[in-house]
């Protein structure tokens, strides 16, 4: 455990020690149910409202527009399902992109079964949504556009403000899955014209199983989880008070350290990209070179299988991923790599390495040299590589 090199921060991040410390009292001393009226629960209520305020402040909005959920997936499901339901009178058409997280794509598939139509807009070779195609996809019955803030596999940051303007000028609601971006990039929901935004604690050094949905006060959607009157009747279930306390702390720390952290990560990211591209032949970088998450790198290596790479990296104590953690168990090439135009044989040799502010240059150097050795070894066993060397 001590010797591992963790390069999978897009899958999850280490809970910040101060976040953990903030959570502990709400498991032990202050375990009151926030819905109970006695004074003993006051601490639980107070920490929830304080976290809500911190989140609202970070997005330039009001605390009343923040609803806690059990993570990013629930927030995505809620935004799509309940917008569809609430505004189906206006129309039954939804627009999204081809590179969304499965929490969006699979929810869209579920909506299609309920009679909604979904258009998946293409992205360019850098993984940036094609705005002209987005505009052409709009119909009189389009009620919602949902485009992620930044992609979890290749890190590409989307033109959110432009999309917000396109949506608003036509009276269409705009949702963004900001799970990878929130806490890492500055986000102002008013400036960017965002109506709904999903985020998740464990992607910003907060706890797992807690997140939130921001819903603009202009919208009128129903609750997704039915039951008690928690979250002003919008999300039933006894609140995850320790999780909310931890999320609040994570948001506070993220806000204070964002600028410095992002600069550090960007620098190290570009160092790693250059080093790998300079030492490993037949490699390519996936995603936009500058318009990308500070911590994301994604490569394709010809003549190797991503799965074999992962296994050999793991034997060296290196945690990485071929795509998103959710797709790594399936054999199909990632829908994101397919959408940027990679043929199957190139996409199958892909590797995502996502660093954090805790990653050191020494760790990057170790990973780069191990990776070069592993790829050399795998290629030496590859009949395709042998054939390529013989015949070009
Ligand atoms: C991780 C992730 C999710 C899911 O969030 P959970 O909190 O794990 O449910 C959704 N969208 C994106 C872009 C993600 O990276």
Image: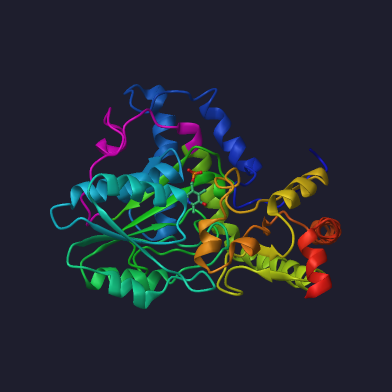
- For the N terminus, the quadrant is top right
* Position of residue 136 in the picture relative to residue 24 (left or right): left
Asked if 213 appears above or below 47 in the picture, the reply is below
Q: Does the image show residue 21?
A: yes
Task: Name the spot of residue 321 as percent of width and height, x first.
Answer: 66, 51
**Residue 214 on the magenta segment:** no
Scheme of colours in the image:
rainbow
Q: Quadrant of residue 359?
A: bottom right
**Residue at coordinates 45% horizontally, 32% vertically from top-left?**
241
Q: In the image shown, does 192 or 62 lie closer to the viewer?
A: 192
Task: Name the spot of residue 390 as percent of width and height, x first.
Answer: 83, 72
Task: Name the spot of residue 179 as percent of width and height, x first.
Answer: 48, 53
* Secondary structure, magenta segment, majority class: loop
Residue furthest to the bottom in view is 132
Q: Quadrant of residue 177?
A: bottom left
- For the C terminus, the quadrant is bottom right
Q: Does the image show residue 185?
A: no
**Residue 232 on the magenta segment:** yes
**Residue at coordinates 57% horizontally, 51% vertically from top-left?**
324
Instruction: Give, as a single range, the part of the protein colored magenta.
Output: 217-243
**Residue at coordinates 35% horizontally, 70% vertically from top-left?**
163
């Amino acid at each position: 455990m001590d010797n591992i090199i963790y390069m999978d921060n897009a899958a999850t991040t280490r809970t910040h020690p101060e976040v953990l410390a903030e959570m502990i009292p709400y498991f032990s001393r202050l375990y009151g149910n926030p819905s109970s009226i006695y004074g003993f629960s006051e601490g639980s209520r107070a920490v929830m409202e304080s976290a809500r305020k911190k989140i609202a402040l970070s997005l330039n909005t009001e605390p009343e527009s923040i609803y806690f959920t059990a993570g990013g997936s629930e927030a995505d499901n809620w935004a799509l399902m309940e917008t569809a339901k609430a505004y189906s009178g206006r129309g039954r058409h939804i627009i999204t992109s081809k590179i969304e997280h499965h929490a969006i794509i699979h929810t869209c598939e579920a909506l299609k079964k309920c009679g909604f139509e979904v258009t998946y807009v293409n992205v360019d070779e850098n993984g940036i949504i094609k705005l002209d195609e987005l505009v052409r996809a709009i119909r009189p019955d389009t009620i919602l556009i949902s485009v992620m803030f930044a992609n979890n596999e290749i890190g590409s940051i989307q033109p959110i403000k432009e999309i917000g303007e396109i949506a608003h000028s036509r009276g269409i609601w705009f949702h963004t899955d900001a799970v990878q971006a929130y806490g890492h990039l500055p986000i102002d929901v008013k400036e960017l014209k965002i109506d709904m935004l999903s985020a998740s604690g464990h992607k910003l050094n907060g706890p797992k199983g807690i997140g939130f949905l921001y819903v603009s006060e202009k919208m009128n959607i129903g609750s997704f989880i039915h039951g008690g009157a928690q979250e002003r009747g919008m999300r039933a279930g006894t609140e995850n008070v320790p999780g909310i306390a931890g999320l609040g702390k994570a948001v506070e720390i993220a806000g204070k350290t964002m600028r410095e952290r992002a600069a550090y990560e960007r620098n190290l990211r570009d160092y790693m990209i250059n080093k790998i591209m300079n030492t490993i032949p037949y490699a390519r970088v996936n995603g936009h070179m500058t318009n990308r998450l500070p911590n994301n790198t994604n490569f394709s290596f010809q003549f190797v299988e991503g799965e074999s790479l992962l296994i050999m990296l793991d034997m060296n104590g290196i945690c990485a991923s071929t795509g998103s953690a959710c797709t790594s168990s399936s054999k199909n090439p990632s829908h994101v790599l397919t959408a940027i135009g990679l043929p199957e044989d190139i996409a199958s040799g892909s590797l995502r390495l996502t660093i954090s502010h805790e990653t050191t240059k020494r760790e990057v150097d170790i990973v780069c040299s191990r990776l070069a050795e592993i790829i050399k070894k795998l290629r030496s066993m590859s009949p395709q590589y042998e054939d390529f060397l013989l015949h070009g």
